[in-house]
Image: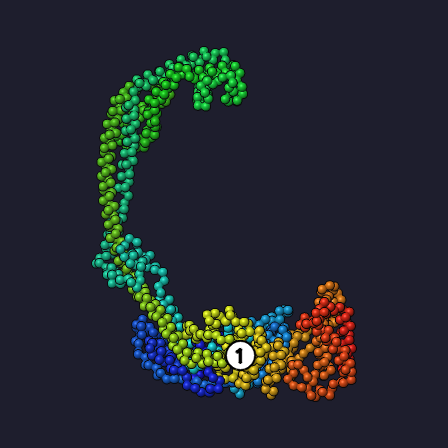
Amino acid sequence: MSIALFREPCLYARMPIPAETKTVQGPPAILPRWANQQDGWCCTIAADVLKSRVTPAQTDIDRYLKMLLGEKKLSADTFEPVPKIEEKQFDKSPLETVRLDAIKLGDGVNAIKAGTEMDFASGVTVIFGENGSGKSGFVRVLKRSAGVRTAEDILHNVRTGNKATPTATFTVTTGSAVQTVKWNNEFGMTPLNRINVFDARGASFHIEDDLTYVYTPGELTLFPLVQNAIERVRTALEGAIVARTPTANTLVTSFERTCSIYSTIETLSAASDLDEIRAYATLPEGIDASIDALTQEVDALKSPHMQNDLKRARDRSGVVKAIKVALGTLQAFDFKVHTTKVRACNSAALRRDEAGSKAFAGLDIPGVLSSEWRQFIQAGEEYLRKNLPQTYPTPSDACVYCQQPLAASAMALIKKYREFSNSEITVQLDAAERELQEYVQPVLGLNAKHLQQQLADEISGTTDVLASLTPVLHKAEELITNAAMRFVADWKDKDAAIVSALVIVRAEETRLSDLTASLQTSLNERQSLLKTKQSELTEFKAKRIVNALLPQIEKRIGDAKWIAKAGIIKNNLTNVLRSLTEAAKEASEELLNKDFAKRFEEESIRLRAPNVTLNFPGRQGQVTRRKLVASYKPSQVLSEGEQKALALADFLTEVTSVPASSPVVFDDPITSMDYRRIHEVCDRIIALSEDRQIIVFTHNIWFAAELLEKAEKKSWKYYDIRMEGSEVGVVTAGTHPRVDGAKQIIGRINQLIAGAEKQTGEVKAALVEKAYEHLRGLCEVIVEQEMFKGVVQRYAPNVMMTKLSQIKLDGFKETIAAIIPIFDKCCRYIASHSQPIETQGIRPTLDELKADFAAVQEAREPHL
């Protein structure tokens, strides 16, 4: 059974096999059994993958699609039955061992100097450095080159303008072969992708995410290949569907909407009745001659001659009716009555003028008794009637126009105006004028000139029966003019002339009515025939077009039917893929999940990780794992330390699942853990180093020291990474973690003293107290490194007997006597130590600090 490695989550689960196992029987032959239950083309895919164990080429996908189309009768190709696959199990072969021998960084890796390198032990390599020393640069290069889940972009030195691409050179041993790997910021490279990395980012992945496995053994590696091939066939089928999908239906533009076949052509689809269309496309004999004849008939029936005659008759009828109405009005006009009313108005007007002359005699009134004056007086009277009492004006009234007081003469004049307007003579004149106006109004409403013009236009240039009406209309114009000017008019033979004219008009009206009716009947008949002939012509033309376009119509309908069937088959592939996923889950459950759960439980016990429920939800052919505490995510319930232990247990289960040794990198794996669990993590890492190369980056000096103490002495290395000035990532090989020397501590105390001298109050006191913390550390370093010469060190696993002879005994008691009181004082002043109640209010002074500092330095002199 072959084993394939993946770094990013693949389509299927990747599950552990015990590392000590060399050759075991694989999972049940589930893939062949599944394939034998599918269509022939699908079974062929599985058979090819089982044989080649590689992703099918594009030529293979084309062949599978061709088989599918033939099997589903979507092509004319003959489909040959596919033989069943032998349902046998598979063996697996272990991977080769991978060991990372060295790394040399190039340009573009944070602020680390190009050329910085590091060799790795075959067992345990510990790299210790404080925050910001450059450890993360190495870790990020390892993560990205390995292509792990938590790989991140690597920045250049942001404090310079050099934006070089990150590079590095690796020396790697695979099996027994040593090779050099040039890395240029690639994500995942063989064999570097065998490196496993655990860091803070990875911890959250192992806690929160639904993770796939880091590798897939045996037959399970073939499931994603089969799924990929089926999905590619589905994509190819979708492409074939798109290729055969008709474009916009331009055929319909060749037809008139009124033809009976229009809606059928407009909605061509898989449901269209092709036999009905073919029947419509059958051409009757002599169709071209029929189309020509119908075209002529339609053109003739469309002639506007009859519409023009009908319009002409209706226009003339309108003129005749207007003249008839005018003649009726003139016939009703009586000259005698008109003369009597005119004379009555003139007589009344004369009497009014005479009365007015008497009333306003001697008054110098401009335009008195003129028409404008009368209009002015009458308008004023109408205003007074509407807005003021009948008694106006009185001595208390003001002028309604200017609102000034009225003099006696003004009041008298206004009263004369009102008496003149309301006198009996004026009332009689108004009545006579109204009667005259009402009598002549019908005649004044006639437009004789317009009637004359209409008549002239009608009889222009022809001998017309209406020509005899011209003199009558001229006399009518004279009558209207005299009536408007209140002249006494006379038309001696008016009645006889109008009667004769009415006889002519009525006869012409009757004739035009009959003519209009006859023309309308003929026009309706022609329009009906035109509609029928146009419909026949449209259908004949449509038949001829359908006959010409029939091959295109048949292809369009055939494509639509093919697409409909192909769409059903494409949708059914979802069920095929779903069944493949279920088969993959079945195989994964048998070999992967059960074994992983057992291993995970063992790792959790070793690390005292909390109990969680391990679920294996599957999706799209994948097998994933998920952790829950009851129904909650671990991050919602557990502490940071518990989460870290749980994530580490999951990571170690993955690592030990691979049946071949490969490098395991830890980046500060004990962050947030208590010290008891740190011991257990250290023990687990050392145990893991028996089978795998271990590389640990840490800033915890105690953890680094314990790892080195427990590691196999012949197969470990230690490096110290630090920052020197502006240079980051300075790597130094060593035998144990470096601790601060007296020189560094003295420098820090001097800085604090200098700062305190510039301050006052609480700031100064705080700096002095902080200096006592470092002074306490200086006492310890003097004892450990200078008095005892490092024979016994806190973080060293052994006693340096070779340095015992370097101890200077002279002045030993004096130094102890000087340092111990100051050390006790330091313990009282620092926050991490308690002091007696009676001394709690005592705070150190700067002068006291200087004195104690000088005393300690003097005490160390004999031992330098």
Across and down, in percent, residue 312 comes to: 28, 37
- In the depicted structure, whether residue 746 falls above or below residue 101: above
Across and down, in percent, residue 207 comes to: 50, 73
- In the depicted structure, whether residue 222 falls above or below residue 251: below
Residue that lies at the very extreme toward the left in this rendered image: 285
Across and down, in percent, residue 71 comes to: 31, 74
Q: Residue 222 or 494: which is nearer the viewer?
A: 222
Q: Residue 370 or 507: which is nearer the viewer?
A: 370
Q: Is residue 279 visible?
A: yes
In this rendering, would 677 be left or right of 267?
right
Q: Quadrant of the C terminus?
A: bottom right
In this rendering, would 299 be left or right of 609?
left
Q: Secondary structure at mark 1?
A: loop
Q: Is residue 57 visible?
A: no
Residue that lies at the very extreme toward the front in this rendered image: 838
Q: Residue 678 or 583: which is nearer the viewer?
A: 678
In this rendering, would 416 be left or right of 504?
right
Q: Residue at x 44, y 78 (%)?
A: 593
Q: Residue at x 75, y 65 (%)?
A: 758
Q: Which residue is mark 1?
A: 607
Q: Quadrant of the N terminus?
A: bottom left
